[in-house]
């Protein structure tokens, strides 16, 4: 009896470890990765995939410390992070799995419906403090952002703020859902969220990156033809040594079937 | 036989208490060792370096100056004591603006080639400051590196900016975090204490047994609710309420955090205080009543003084819960690292900062050490609270 149990346990462990893979990182990629993993496990009964969030920085830290197989990231890996991996004599593999557009959102009761990049920079670095300075009502601007571990935080800083620091008064929320909630209940609020998070209780602004000549509303079409300026690739980072383990799953995501899920979840497909 | 058994029991007790004390001491030692490592380090990211033209008279910068330069607040070297020349920023990705693809062929695999190009460029541009990896740094005779002032104790405690991930110069000023923590937890305990004490007295002395038997499990149930649930409740209910009540532009404030924390600390305060009030000997109560004191006089002249040490324990536990709570506070206080002037402003507390940032901080890095230093401060605050309360309740006991 004992021997049978032992054999069962050993074989279970063997099956489990052979197909078990862990994904960790960006909260933006999280819903997509979960859905992909679900579908993948439906097709491959023996596969075990666990997906957890925490932010792009958290995922990449975990990859460096070898506590995850794939780091999901909504920004490119920083040079310093890459150096830590090469120091350990390992090579990192980068895969773009989908694209995402960042929407700048305000309360639906806000009269402002479009902003230029320069105005956004002013608002998020604390130079512009009142909505009337950008053509709205006379009310203070309440700025919401993400925690610094978030890839969205870094991406917005690099692409919209021209690498300047956020103002200290920017409130940092632990999750994108919290930004949506707060913006929907605060009249003077502004925040940035992934494209998939746009709902009816918030308003997405039209954005111009050419000084106000052309304002573009975020839509999946505008992001695909690159006319919407704030869009970004979403990455899966893994170590070359674990390529064999994760290849089937990544292939699944890149397949037409996997890309259909990308579209369904509100992200932009690769092609 | 009995003696041996007794000796063995003693030995086991001694061993387990020694082990637990040593464990606690080791944890504290670890905390401080990691935390104190922050001081004296340069606030520039590990493995990175700042490169300028040799003709530039500036040799070192404070971290504050560096931040202002890279935020494009300072645009002329004159501001930081240099010559009258405009500042030109350079980050590694900017290399493609200066060289053509052909000139940079193979640069993404060959770090040395990249650095040669950067040195060449900085050698030509007198006002340029380049932020580049130190590895395989190629210094030619036209460039030099700039030193950044290390993190000091006074800069850490007195600094007003908390930008731990800002590059190239991280800012580790904890004053906003420290003040935020103190404001939120002090107000929380001020709100929770009267309600908690009143409920404890009511449940122990005034309520009928049937009411009490119903209330007690309900209160204990409150302490079993996970803090995320409290946080979500706070974000949906208390935050808009605070916003409307005080007509604020934003509801995520220290006050919202204090209210949520007060609700969370209540069960602890009520349970511990009620137990100690009920522990008052029946003989003392009866003696007081027999002397002609009313029920109320008995409560506040006999029972509460008798239970005072238990009540202070309740307060300590309550404060402990308030100061150390992370998740609920993270969701409702807005987490903006600014120096608070009123309780109706967004605040960022120390535990919330540690919880939000420790996951991304690379082990052994500056940010990691700064978060451990914050942990040390949290530890010292709790220690101080405990010692104060011990001192006060100890004094009372002697008087009695």
Image (cartoon, rainbow, N blue to C red):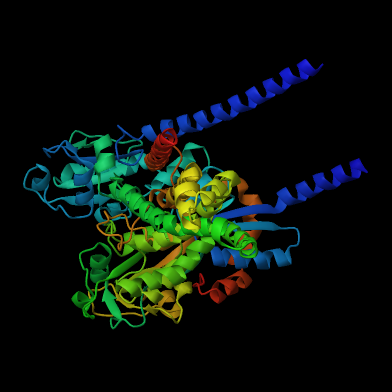
Q: Is residue B307 above or below residue B98?
A: above
Answer yes or no: is residue A18 visible: yes
Q: Nearer the viewer, residue B350 or B264?
A: B264
Task: Please report the residue visible at 28 percent of the width from the left and 41 percent of the height from the top.
Answer: B157
Q: Nearer the viewer, residue B43 or B39?
A: B39
Q: Quadrant of the C terminus of chain B?
A: top left
Q: Position of residue B263 (x, y in %)?
A: 48, 60
Q: Position of residue A260 (x, y in %)?
A: 59, 74
Q: Position of residue A138 (x, y in %)?
A: 21, 78
Q: Nearer the viewer, residue B352 or A216?
A: B352
- Which quadrant of the figure has residue B20? top right
Q: Is residue A263 above or below residue B44?
A: below
Is B3 placed left or right of B289 in the picture?
A: right
Task: Please report the residue visible at 37 percent of the width from the left and 65 percent of the height from the top.
Answer: B252
- Which quadrant of the figure has residue A192? bottom left
Q: Quadrant of the N terminus of chain B?
A: top right
Answer yes or no: is residue A75 visible: no
Q: Position of residue B280 (x, y in %)?
A: 56, 45
């Amino acid at each position: 009896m004992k021997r049978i149990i032992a054999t069962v346990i050993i074989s279970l462990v063997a099956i489990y470890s052979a197909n078990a893979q862990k994904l960790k990182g960006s909260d933006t990629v999280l819903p997509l990765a979960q859905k992909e993993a679900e579908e993948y496990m439906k097709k491959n009964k023996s596969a075990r995939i666990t997906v957890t969030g925490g932010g792009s920085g958290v995922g990449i830290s975990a990859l460096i410390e070898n506590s995850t197989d794939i780091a999901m990231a909504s920004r490119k890996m920083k040079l310093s992070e890459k150096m830590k991996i090469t120091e350990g004599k390992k090579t990192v593999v980068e895969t773009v799995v989908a694209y995402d557009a960042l929407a700048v959102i305000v309360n639906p009761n806000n009269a402002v419906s479009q902003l230029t990049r320069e105005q956004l920079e002013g608002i998020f670095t604390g130079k512009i403090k009142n909505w009337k300075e950008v053509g709205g009502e006379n009310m203070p601007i309440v700025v919401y952002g993400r925690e610094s571990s978030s890839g969205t935080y870094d991406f917005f800083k690099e692409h919209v703020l021209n690498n300047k620091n956020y103002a200290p008064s920017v409130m940092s929320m632990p999750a994108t859902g919290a930004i949506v909630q707060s913006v929907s209940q605060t009249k003077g609020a502004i925040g940035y969220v992934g494209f998939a998070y746009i709902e009816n209780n918030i308003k997405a602004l039209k954005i111009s990156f050419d000084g106000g000549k052309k304002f573009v509303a975020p839509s999946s079409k505008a992001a695909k033809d690159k006319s919407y300026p704030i869009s970004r690739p979403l990455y899966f980072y893994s170590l070359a040594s674990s390529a064999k383990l994760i290849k089937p799953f990544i292939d699944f995501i890149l397949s037409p079937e996997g890309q259909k899920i990308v579209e369904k979840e509100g992200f932009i497909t690769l092609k | 036989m009995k003696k041996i058994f007794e000796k063995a029991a003693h030995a086991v007790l001694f061993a387990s208490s020694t082990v637990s004390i040593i464990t606690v001491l080791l944890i504290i030692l670890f905390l401080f060792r990691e935390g104190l490592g922050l001081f004296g380090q340069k606030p520039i990211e590990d493995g990175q370096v700042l490169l300028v033209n040799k003709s530039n008279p500036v040799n070192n910068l404070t971290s504050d100056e560096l931040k202002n330069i890279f935020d494009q607040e300072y645009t002329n070297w004159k501001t930081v004591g240099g010559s009258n020349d405009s500042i030109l920023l350079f980050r590694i990705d900017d290399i493609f603006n200066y060289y053509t693809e052909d000139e940079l062929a193979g640069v993404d695999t060959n770090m040395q080639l990249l650095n040669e190009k950067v040195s060449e460029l900085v050698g030509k541009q007198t006002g340029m400051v380049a932020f580049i990896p130190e590895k395989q740094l190629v210094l030619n005779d036209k460039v030099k590196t700039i030193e950044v002032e290390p993190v000091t104790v006074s800069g850490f405690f007195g600094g007003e900016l908390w930008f731990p991930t800002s590059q190239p110069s991280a800012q580790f000023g904890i004053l906003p975090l420290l003040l935020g923590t103190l404001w939120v937890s002090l107000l929380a305990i001020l709100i929770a204490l009267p309600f908690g004490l009143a409920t404890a007295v009511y449940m122990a002395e005034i309520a009928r047994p049937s009411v009490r038997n119903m209330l007690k499990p309900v209160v204990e149930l409150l302490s079993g609710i996970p803090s995320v649930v409290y946080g979500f409740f706070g974000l949906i209910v208390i935050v808009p309420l605070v916003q409307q009540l005080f007509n604020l532009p934003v509801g995520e404030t220290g006050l919202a955090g204090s209210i949520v924390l007060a609700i969370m600390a209540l069960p602890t305060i009520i349970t511990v205080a009620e137990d100690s009030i009920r522990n008052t000997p029946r003989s003392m109560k009866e003696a007081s009543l027999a002397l002609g004191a009313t029920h109320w006089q008995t409560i506040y002249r006999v029972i509460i003084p008798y239970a005072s040490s238990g009540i202070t324990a309740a307060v300590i536990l309550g404060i402990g819960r308030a100061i150390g709570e992370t998740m609920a506070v993270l969701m409702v206080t807005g987490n903006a690292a600014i120096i608070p002037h009123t309780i109706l402003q967004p605040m960022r507390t120390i535990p919330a900062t540690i919880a939000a940032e420790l996951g991304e901080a690379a082990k052994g890095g500056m940010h990691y050490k700064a978060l451990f230093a914050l942990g040390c401060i949290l530890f010292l605050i709790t220690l101080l609270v405990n010692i104060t309360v011990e001192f006060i309740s100890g004094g009372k006991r002697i008087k009695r």
